[in-house]
Structures are given as structure tokens and as C-alpha cells.
Amino acid sequence: MIEVQHLTKRYGPTTAVDDVSFRVERGEVLGFLGPNGAGKTTTMRVLTGYMPPTDGKAIVAGYDIFDQPIEAKRRIGYLPETPPLYPEMTVRDYLTFVAKIKAVPKRGRAARVNEVMERTRVADMANRHCGKLSKGYRQRVGLAQSLLNNPEVLILDEPTAGLDPKQIIDTRRLIKELGGDHTIILSTHILPEVSQTCQRVVIINKGRVVAVDTPDNLTSRLRGSETMLVQVDAPAGDDVKHALGIVPGVTNVAVAESHGTTSSYEVNSDTGRDVRRQLAAVVVSNGWGLLELRPLRMSLEEIFLHLTTEEMPHE
Amino acid sequence: MSNVLAIAHKELKGYFASPIAYIVIGFSAILFGWFFINLLYYFDRMALQAGGGFGGPQSVNVNESLISPLFLNVSVILLFTLPLVTMRTYSEEKRSGTIELLLTSPLTDLQIVLGKFLGGLTLYAAMLGVTLVHIGILFWYGNPEWRPVLTGYLGLLLMGGCFLSLGLFVSSLTRNQIVAGMITFAIFLLFWVINWIATFTGPTTQNVLNYLSITEHLNDFTRGVLDTKHLVYYTSFIAFSLFLTVRAVDSERWRG
């Protein structure tokens, strides 16, 4: 449903997003996890067609966001970091305006606005000016806005930021409900949020994808095991996986990425046991080129440290 | 087209939800009324002198001596009011982040620009609508020709369109609406006075300066003359400014 290939975005000399690739399947809820300034917002802005990438491409709901922006945008709902509200409009007027520009047919537009207001629990504020809403309501009106065109893809940039604990729980429940009908990417810098709402997580730091996995695997990987990233000059296949898997001390091998003739693997091993020497030997003896071999654990841990320390004041 | 209208409608509602529409319409109504009274007294005196008060053969023309100068004075009003109309168009959307909504909706940049232009133009038309009262009074008590009045209004609409499109472009360059307003005002002023030194320069420079002046092109319109030269000037001015606005919005996307 969403395919991001080698996405790079540079602002002048600074690189905000650096060669990011991932996929999201239909109906999946993908968490985009990373500290502030990691490139989450930039990636989302590229995916929604707000800005073009410097390099690489993004295909959303079957349309290249850069080549066929109108078709792609029809199928996207987007909640930016700050909800894009017009303070002088009432909630109902605002949602009606958004429905118009999102090509919701005139027949049934009013009903759709009502339906979305009910769903996001903002109906009681329908005639209130957007500028007079509390932070929680603003966020929910922003969410309502993104649902109007019944999008196949929902992109939510920190949907729970600034909400109180009860609102956070409500919003997370709503997002979970929406998953299945919609393909969702949500960004957050809060670790537990991901485990509660998402089926898969992309961890991004300094513009690069550090890990892609399910929340459970990520947490277990952190506990008591070492992870190596091995990139070899061979197409992804079971023989590579198998060869790496039988190295003594290795507990699990997973394909991390594969591009044509090269592929990379995440290799878990028992703690305190350095398997790098053996891994290298296995790769070389099988005649594949060893392109990269580095431990992942440290960098992951660093990020989690960031994430968990930032979580403290929130909950 | 429905997208353009949706944006235009939103812009118009925005003007009337804020004090801007009332300030602009009120201010221009007062100023226009003031010009009207002044020119009416002046016209009255001229008519007395010309006809000796007894409707002699040398009677003065209402169109030439009253309506035409009145229309030309409108450019002064536009100089001060139209920067207020355009300064927030893009700047405010950028500052508040609503630009993100517009640019991620299934709209083209051109549709957004045209919608905003149309919204501003409608407010400006409402502003001109007030002046119909004064012109109506002249038709009620006098017998002016209607053709110069019609072309005059067309000219005013086009001239205002130039100011609006230019203001829109300036607003698309900054997120600070005060800066947008000031720069727009400065450029308007420049276009307004650009031909003041024309009489002291050589014939070629004089022609160029006169051609550039936004107000110079209004003269013929107020006299009932519909010259393609002026139509081309105004429409290409508007088209070029709107084109620049689209490019500015697009380049902003690339720079992020």
C-alpha cells in the first residue's frame, strides 16, 4: 500500500532523511519511532506530497506521489504535527471546507462531516470556532479532517502529542479501530505508544532507518541478545539465512533489507559471545562478498534510552 | 473549477470573519465619499462659471470633469487598502501551518492561487460596489453617459486585479504578514509614482515609464476608450504575477 524506496531529503547542506526504504501492507498500522529531529516529519511530508524528495521515490496507494500527486493525495488523509485549523472558522464550517477540497461529493457531504465528528468525538463543539478549542479538541478536529475523504492511507504525525492521559487512551483506541480499514503510519517518540497501537515499527534516527520489526521482537531483541547487521553480496535467500543460522551462538536470523543482488540480515546471538569472526568466515567460505558487518545493539539501545527518558514526563 | 471556488469562498469568509473586510470597505467608502464631495463642489463651480448658471452652450461634461477624475482617485484608495487584503493570504497560512493542509489536498498550486486571487477580487468588487451609490446619484440627478462609466469600472477592476496579484505574490514569499503588507505597499507606491519623472526624460524613457505605470493605463478606461494596449497590459500583469506566485509556492516546496 505504501512503498518508500531510497528516500533522501536534503535541506541545503543538511540531510534530514538519508536513503530510507520501507513498505507498509494494506490494513497495517506502522509506527514511526525516533527522537525529535530524526526525520519523521520530513518523511511524512514527502509521503503526503507536501514536498518532493531530493532522491528516491514513494508510492502511496498505487500512485507515485511525485508523478501523480492528485491521484495519490485523493487517497491520503494527513494530520500534520500542528493541526491545520483556521481559527476563525467553526468546526463544522472547517470540516465542510476540507471535505470540499478533498473532493467529497456534494451529495452526502454534510452527512460525512457529521459522521466523522461523531467518530472523533468533536460533535459537541461543532459550532465552536476552531481558535477557541482546547489542545485536545484541536488534535481531534485535525484527526477528523484527515478522515473526511475516507482515505486508504492515513498519515498521522504525533497524533497524541499534547493530549491528557485519558485523551491519549481514546485516541489510541480510535487509531486501532481505524487500522484494518485504513493503512496507517503514525509517528511518535513514545515507546509504549508503539507497542499499544502498531503491528510493526520503523525506528529512525538521524535520518536513517535503524531497525524494522514488530514491537515485541524489538523489545525482546533488546533483552539479553546481541544483534549484528550483515550485508552480503548475494540475493536474499534461504541459503544465506541458513548458513548464518548454523553459526554456533546465533539464535535468530532475519532478512533486514534486500535490493537485487545484495541483501542484509539481522543476526541475533547470545549475549557476551562475539560471533563476528565466525559470521565473516561463513560468508567468505560460501563465496559471497561481505559488504558490511556491524553490531546494531548499541545504537538501538542509545535510541531507546532517548525514547524512554523522554517518556517519563508524559506518563 | 469547484476547487477554485471552494478556496475563493473560504478566503472571502476569512475576510469577513476578521475585521479586514470591514476596515477595507469602510475606509474606501469614506475616502471615496470624500473625493466625491470635493469633485462635486468643484464641478458645481465649474458648471456655474461655464454656463453662467443659465445652462449656456459651454456646459461642462459630467463624465469628463467628475466621473473620470473620481475613478482616477480610486488608485489612491487601492494603494492603502489592497495591501491589507493580500498581506495575509499566504503568509498567514504558512505561519499557522494550514498551508500544509492545502498543499497535501488534491489541489494544484494553480487552483489554490486562482482561488485566493478570486477571493480577493470579490472583496474588491464589493468595495467598488459601494461606489455605485455615488455614481447612481449622478445618474439620478444628471445625465452622464453610461459607456465611460462601464469601461471605467472595468478599468478599476483590472487595475485592482494587478495590485491584488502582485500582493498575492509578495505574500507567498514570507510568513510574516506585516512584512508582506509593507513590501506590497512599497511596490504599489513605486508603480504609482514611476512615471512622475517621465516629463524630464527623453521620449523613449518617457514611453517606457508611462507604460509601466499601473495608473497611467486607467486614463483611457475612464474616458470610455477600450484600448487593447491597456487590456493587454493589465491582463498580462495579472497573469505574470499569478504565474510568479505559483512558482514561488512550488520553489518553497523544494526548499522545504
Image: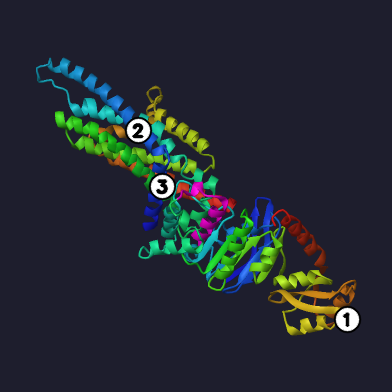
Q: Is residue A210 magenta?
A: no
Whole-number angstrom distance, CA of label 2 to CA of label 1: 85 Å
Residue A25 at least partly seen:
yes
Label disc, if present, on residue B26 of the rendered structure: 2
Q: Quadrant of the N terminus of chain A?
A: bottom right
Label 3 close to label 1 by CB (< 8 Å): no
Whole-number angstrom distance, CA of label 3 to CA of label 1: 69 Å
- The residue at which mark 1 appears reads as A248
Residue at image point 79% right, 69% down: A222
Say if B138 sits above or below B170 in the image.
Answer: above
- The residue at which mark 3 appears reads as B11
**Mark 3 crowd level (few <14, some 14–19, many ≥20, 10 Å Cα):** many
Q: In the image, what residue type sits under mark 3? A: Glu
Q: Position of residue A165 (x, y in %)?
A: 64, 58
Residue A56 at least partly seen:
no
Residue at image point 74% right, 70% down: A218
Q: In the image, what residue type sits under mark 2? A: Gly
Say if A8 sits above or below A242 in the image.
Answer: above
The magenta-colored residue range is A128-146
Disc 3 sits on a residue from what chain?
B
Same chain for mark 2 and mark 1? The answer is no
Instruction: Name the side, left or right, on which B50 lies relative to B205.
Output: left
Q: In the image, what residue type sits under mark 1? A: Pro
Residue at image point 15% right, 31% down: B140
